[in-house]
Amino acid sequence: MVNQKSSAGVAGAMIALCTAVALLCNFGGSVSGQREAEEIAKDAALANAQPDQGMFQGYQQLSDPLLVLVNGEVPLPETWEFLPFLVDDQVVDRRMGEDLSRMLHDGEEEGVWLWVASGYRSRERQQALLDQAVRENREAGMGEEEALADALKTLAQPGHSEHETGLAVDFNDVSPGFADTKASRWLEANAWKYGFVQRYKGAKTKVTGVEEESWHYRYVGRDHAREMEEKDLCLEEYVLYRKALGDN
């Protein structure tokens, strides 16, 4: 069942779309008028792209596979097709293979050493990692519930991990210290040019439900990454923005 916030988001999307259509009619179809209407529609869409935790119950995926949303509320679609491609001894989805290889090469040309520490994970592998983390927490003296809750701070439930899409990669040493490295700063400035976005930014934690992960990047394609960078949108915000513009 879609909750009230989700229904409000759909209603907002329809309002934005209707506004754009009305404006196009009023401007008589002129090029300048169309552009102004498009900008107004985009502003209205941005206003609707402000989700809260709990908003994505019953979420319907967009048709663009590069914008597949996977988070604590939205599982990976059962119909998802993974296309394997090998980079740095790690398997990723082929749809990002060329851009990822080019980004690693260009970084090296600029004196930045980047390597893929983790790419695609099967659901079974994700479960094994979670089980291991829980076991280690239990051995450290935590109770069962506390051990699981602590493990879930850094590991997603099986079926809810972006790594299962093959479109997410973890770079280098996968630690908070990565944020202070030259490699991290280079990614912040350049990753979007190759179609990648930092998936979990500290400023977006209330939206994503995940603490800052400077090492975790998600491939969305160059056009989407550029727009997300320009508008400072995380993936949750961006998919709602696209829906408000009429994408399906």
Image (spheres, rainbow, N blue to C red):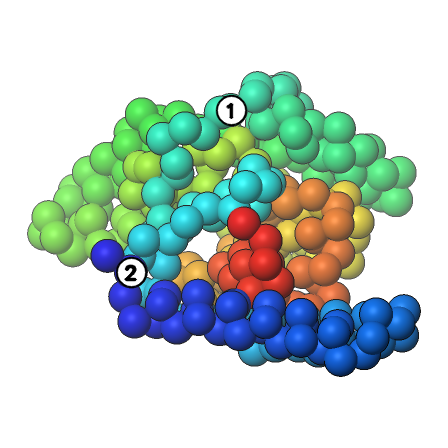
| Element on which disc 2 rests | loop
| Location of residue 153 by image quarter | bottom left
Question: What residue is shown with label 1?
Answer: 82
| Residue 166, image x, y percentages | 53, 31
Q: Quadrant of the N terminus?
A: bottom left
Which residue is painted at 50% across and 29% down in the image? 120
Q: Nearer the viewer, residue 7 or 238?
A: 7
| Location of residue 94 by image quarter | top right
Q: CA distance from mark 1 to mark 2?
A: 28 Å
- In this view, the residue farthest toward the left is 143
| Location of residue 180 by image quarter | bottom right
- Earlier along the polypeptide chain: callout 1 or callout 2? 2
Residue type at mark 1: give it. Phe
| Residue 103, image x, y percentages | 78, 38
**Apparent side of residue 2 relative to residue 112 in the rendered image (left or right):** left
| Element on which disc 1 rests | loop
| Residue 106, image x, y percentages | 85, 38
Which residue is painted at 39% across and 36% down in the image? 77
Q: Would residue 100 be visible to someone looking at this image? A: yes
Q: Would residue 153 be visible to someone looking at this image? A: no
Question: What residue is shown with label 2?
Answer: 2
